[in-house]
């Protein structure tokens, strides 16, 4: 039931682009994306609901492919501040969405080098 | 808005001792969640409250764990007879929900527990 994230780690030069994927074997109601820096709280990035929507702000965007039960996070022209571990948290469809706890993937480590 | 706060930030205890952690959510949030995170893993859901009612518990929450939210504001998580396997970061998150829709959970900085 735990979503699978890929890749496990990415090393980029500042200004390069990255894509992080999150796949589930269960039908999803929503996908939540967070970034966590070492020793700090996970910081909310965005939520995507079933329906295949795409969201974005600044140079970070995400999509949700309902048919594939997969979400992708896109980081464009990466900045040093983007370094950290990115987690997707999922709510499965049979839970009805809403008030349940999220099931997180193991994370993708992103390192941005100057 | 000061965000979600947790206390203490670090706790070292000996095996067999009891420990209690506190979480203060964002003031207008009616939902409060507890998660546990171990090294190299994502947060794992433990339990959540809607106001003062505890509505869901994970099977990870053994009978040594108990959580309360007595007045629908702050929450405490107690671990009795701690074991070395309890060593982890304990994260609290809060959200506001008007019902029926997925809500955004905002995390606190966590309490790192080390059981010797």
Image (tube, coloured by chain):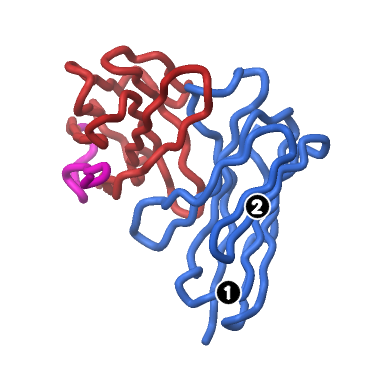
Chain colours: A blue, B red
**Chain of residue at mark 1:** A
Q: Is residue A101 left or right of residue B82?
A: right
SS class of the residue under badge 2?
strand
Residue nearer the viewer, A36 or A14: A14
The structure residue drawn at horizontal position 18% and vertical position 32%, both measured from the top left corner, is B20
Q: Is residue A15 left or right of residue A34?
A: right
Q: Is residue A84 left or right of residue B24?
A: right
The structure residue drawn at horizontal position 62% and vertical position 34%, both measured from the top left corner, is A30
**Residues tagged 1 and 2 counted as in contact (Cβ below 8 A):** no
- Membership of B78 in magenta stretch: no
**Range shown magenta:** B1-16
Determine crowd level at label 2: few under 14, some 14-19, many 20+ residues with C-alpha closer than 10 A.
many
Position of residue A64 measured from the top left corner of the image (x, y, whole percent) = 71, 43
Residue located beneath label 2 in the image: A62
Position of residue B111 measured from the top left corner of the image (x, y, whole percent) = 26, 45
Image quarter of the N terminus of chain A: top right
Residue located beneath label 1 in the image: A78
Labels 1 and 2 in the same subunit: yes
Q: Does the image show residue A60?
A: yes
Looking at the image, is B112 positioned above or below residue A37? above
The structure residue drawn at horizontal position 36% and vertical position 43%, both measured from the top left corner, is B107
Q: Which mark is residue B15?
A: none
SS class of the residue under badge 1?
loop
**Chain of residue at mark 2:** A
Position of residue B46 measured from the top left corner of the image (x, y, whole percent) = 41, 28
Residue nearer the viewer, A43 or A76: A76
> Separation of disc 1 and disc 2 at Cα?
15 Å
- Membership of B13 in magenta stretch: yes
Quarter where residue A27 is shown: top right
Give whichever of discs 1 and 2 has the lower sequence position: 2
Q: Residue furthest right?
A: A67
């Amino acid at each position: 039931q735990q979503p699978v994230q890929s890749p496990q780690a990415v090393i980029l030069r500042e200004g390069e682009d990255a894509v992080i994927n999150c796949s589930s074997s269960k039908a999803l109601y929503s996908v939540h994306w967070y970034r966590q820096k070492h020793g700090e709280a996970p910081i909310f990035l965005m939520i995507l609901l079933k329906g295949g929507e795409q969201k974005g702000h600044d140079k970070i965007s995400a999509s949700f492919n309902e048919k594939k039960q997969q979400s992708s996070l896109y980081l464009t022209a990466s900045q040093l501040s983007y370094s950290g571990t990115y987690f997707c948290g999922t709510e499965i469809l049979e839970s009805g969405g809403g008030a349940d706890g999220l099931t997180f993937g193991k994370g993708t480590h992103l390192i941005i080098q100057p | 808005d000061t965000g979600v706060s947790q206390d203490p930030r670090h706790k070292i205890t000996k095996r067999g001792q009891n420990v209690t952690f506190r979480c203060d959510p964002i003031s207008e949030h009616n939902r409060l969640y507890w998660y546990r995170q171990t090294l190299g893993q994502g947060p794992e859901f433990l339990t959540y409250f809607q106001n003062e009612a505890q509505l869901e518990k994970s099977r990870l929450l053994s009978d040594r764990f108990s959580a309360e939210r007595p007045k629908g504001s702050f929450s405490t998580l107690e671990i009795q007879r701690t074991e070395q396997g309890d060593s982890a970061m304990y994260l609290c998150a809060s959200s506001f929900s008007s019902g029926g829709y997925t809500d955004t959970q905002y995390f606190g900085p966590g309490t790192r527990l080390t059981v010797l």
